[in-house]
Image (spheres, rainbow, N blue to C red):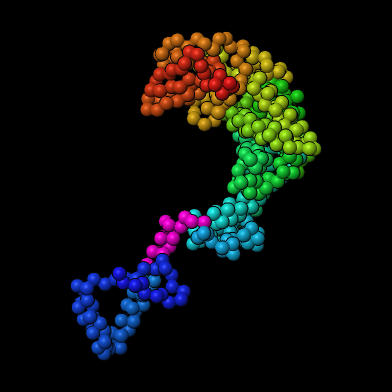
Amino acid sequence: MASRRQEPEGHDANMQLVTVDPSKASALQGIAEELKRPKSRTAKAWIAVGAAMGLAFVVATAFAAVGLEHWFHHEHPSDASPESDVPSLATQWNEGCCRFAPLYNGSNWRDPQIQRSFVENALAAERHFFAAPSIAFDAETGMTYDGRDLDIETLEPTTIRPASAPSKESIQLSLLALSLQTTEEAGEWLAHFQPLVYSQKEALDLLEKKVSTMEDFDRRYPAFGGFLPWFCARGALEDGRCRGLNDPAGGLEPTYDFHDSMPGLDNGQMAWAIVALVHVLKKKATADSTGRISSLAERWEQRLLRMQATAVNLFYNGNGSGTVRALTWLRNRSVDATDPTNSWTYSSYVLDDAFEGEMMGLFMDLLGNWSGYGSTKRLKSKQQHSTCPAARILQSRKDFGSLRMSNGRLCRCRTWRCHMSESSSLTENLRG
């Protein structure tokens, strides 16, 4: 076995030497001899150009080979880049918002330090929007804006779009819940980033403003039952237009086109965001010595219980309908949502999609109050429409399974048929 040639200092062990096939040696020797002969000035110039191009090709190929080998085989923590090679938050702030990405050109994305650094910088940049009062949400009411217009030249924020919806609330509530998770639940990797989403003080301050605004809206308009229409985040002017930043903030008001109606779509998203938030707050409250988190947990849980009590009355389309309302109308905004006769729909617009619609259907099925809608154990037939006689969450498809709701119970639908156990339901299993 031949001994390994000692490599010069600084040699990269990943670089491979090129071996030559002995059968080609004579041809290569001939080329070498030809190159030794005197050449004209023009020929020498072309040789120089060709040699330069060839050298550039070889160098580029070598770097590409080493880079690809590094990408596919760089798996060991010991190979991680040193801290000095990782772009830092300080670099991001010096460069300004959204200018940090080029610093990662050529980075090894398998390196955990590179991954962490990129997420840190991305969050630090995005916080300029989602965590900024009077940019993404109202500083006084705590409620989200639909968005913010940008100057087409400078990209600086200009006018707000103060009309917003429960779907926007669902995103911010989810981020707030994420930022407040305990380290035990979040895990070490995610816990590292939580202060870059919202600090605990930011999150608690914002949640107090939101819940106060929503409690006040529910007192003034009990027909919405704790859910929300499209709303004016800073209140509305006398002519129905939403108040802007130059107008004094008022109580939350429905937008003029949703003054007596609300969407089942958006509210399904918000409902589950509040479920997550209540879970996180109650978990966090166990280690709260000040009582502030405990108080917030109680107030948000009351919001959730209110929605659980009214969801079926507001969005179920009635016995025998087999549908959940995508939009529900209210006869009188002063009548409490616990009265099922106050909500109605005149359209055929019902929930049949696999995201927002499913979320409201599942919230009603798993957490809603079905006490006024008869027995839930009348599932005998195996025909398509009679097996799941109540609210249909998803349109069944020939090719794949879907879910339908049956008077507060879930059943699994496959190929135009539904089936479920007579003695058990997903609802009972989850509650048990």
The residue lying at 41 percent from left, 66 percent from top is 14
Residue with the most extreme front position: 1
The residue lying at 46 percent from left, 76 percent from top is 9
Observer-nearest of 269 and 59: 59
Locate the C terminus and report the quarter of the image it occupies.
top right
Counting every numbered tag in the picture gives: 0
Point out residue 279 in the picture as x, y percentages from the top left corner.
Answer: 65, 32
The residue lying at 43 percent from left, 73 percent from top is 11
Point out residue 286 in the picture as x, y percentages from the top left corner.
Answer: 72, 34
Point out residue 28 in the picture as x, y percentages from the top left corner.
Answer: 23, 77
**Is residue 67 on the magenta stretch?**
yes
> Looking at the picture, does residue 196 appear above or below residue 235?
below
Q: Quick check: 46 left or right of 168?
A: left
**What residue span does the magenta drawing correspond to?**
60-77
User: Residue 380's image quarter?
Assistant: top left
Q: Quick check: 29 left or right of 373?
A: left
**Is residue 326 on the magenta stretch?**
no
Q: Is most of the magenta stretch helix, strand or loop?
A: helix
Point out residue 382 in the picture as x, y percentages from the top left corner.
Answer: 41, 13
- Residue 351 in sight here: yes
- Residue 148 in sight here: no
